Amino acid sequence: MAGVRLVYKLYQYYQLSTSFLYAALLARWLILMPLVGSRFLPGGIHEFFIYLMLCSSVVETLWLFKFYGLKNGLLSRTFLKDLNFIYLVRVIHFYDDYEHALILKNASYSSFIICLSLSQAYCHWCKLFKRKGVKERTVIWKINTYITLPILYLSEFALLLLNIQVKNYHSTPTLEIINRAVLLAFFPILLTAYKKLLTK
């Protein structure tokens, strides 16, 4: 029983801290953007943004497998989301020259950060209080579902498209093939997952 309580407390701590960190990401953007503009924004936010997205996705995947098992976890929308975020980290990391990466100075980079912060802070906060079998479509849920998420998806697609168009030395022939395959499959997979969200 003590072990179960510990696991539950750790899960709560993960959801609460992740929600807070995504809110902090938004606050960081709100502070930096007026001060430095989009030209120098990546230098002040990119590392925090990338490592937050990577770590939260990896840990969420582990919790997913813990509670739902490997098979059900792999078939869930949450795993698809986490896999997508981990892939995106690989594609736009630019670990040694992100201050100069042209695609990170595009408006889609800022819109992605804003919508990611809002959607993930809301998502992880809701999981703190989620009750099985209860469906609550509040005003915030509607704003997140019908405004924030579509902008997030379009921003990500724009970043992936720019990543193919703007050549960089981090890319490899294999990664370029994967990137093009992801772009082709992006909207069919996205629309399927989005439809499930609307009908759940």
Image (spheres, rainbow, N blue to C red):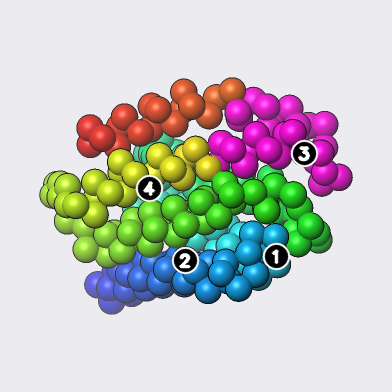
Percent of width and height locating residue 107: 59, 49
Q: Residue at x 21, y 57 (%)?
A: 130
Note whether 29 is above or below 193 in the view shown.
below
Secondary structure under tag 1 reads: helix
Tag 3 near tag 4, CB within 8 Å: no
User: Disc 4 designates what residue?
Assistant: 148
Say which of marks 3 and 1 sits in front.
1
The type of residue carrying mark 4 is: Thr
CA–CA distance in space, label 4 to label 2: 13 Å
Q: Amino acid at mark 2?
A: Leu
Residue 43 coordinates in the image, percent (x, y): 70, 67
Measured as percent of width and height from the top left, residue 122 is found at: 33, 59
Asked whether the residues under the numbered discs 4 and 1 touch, taking CB atoms below 8 Å apart as contact, a structural biologist would say no
Q: Residues within 10 Å of mark 3 (few under 14, many from 20)?
A: few
Q: Earlier in the sequence, mark 3 or mark 1?
A: 1
Q: Nearer the viewer, residue 56 or 72?
A: 56
- Which residue in the protein does label 3 denote? 166
Task: Report how many numbered discs are placed on residues in the image.
Answer: 4
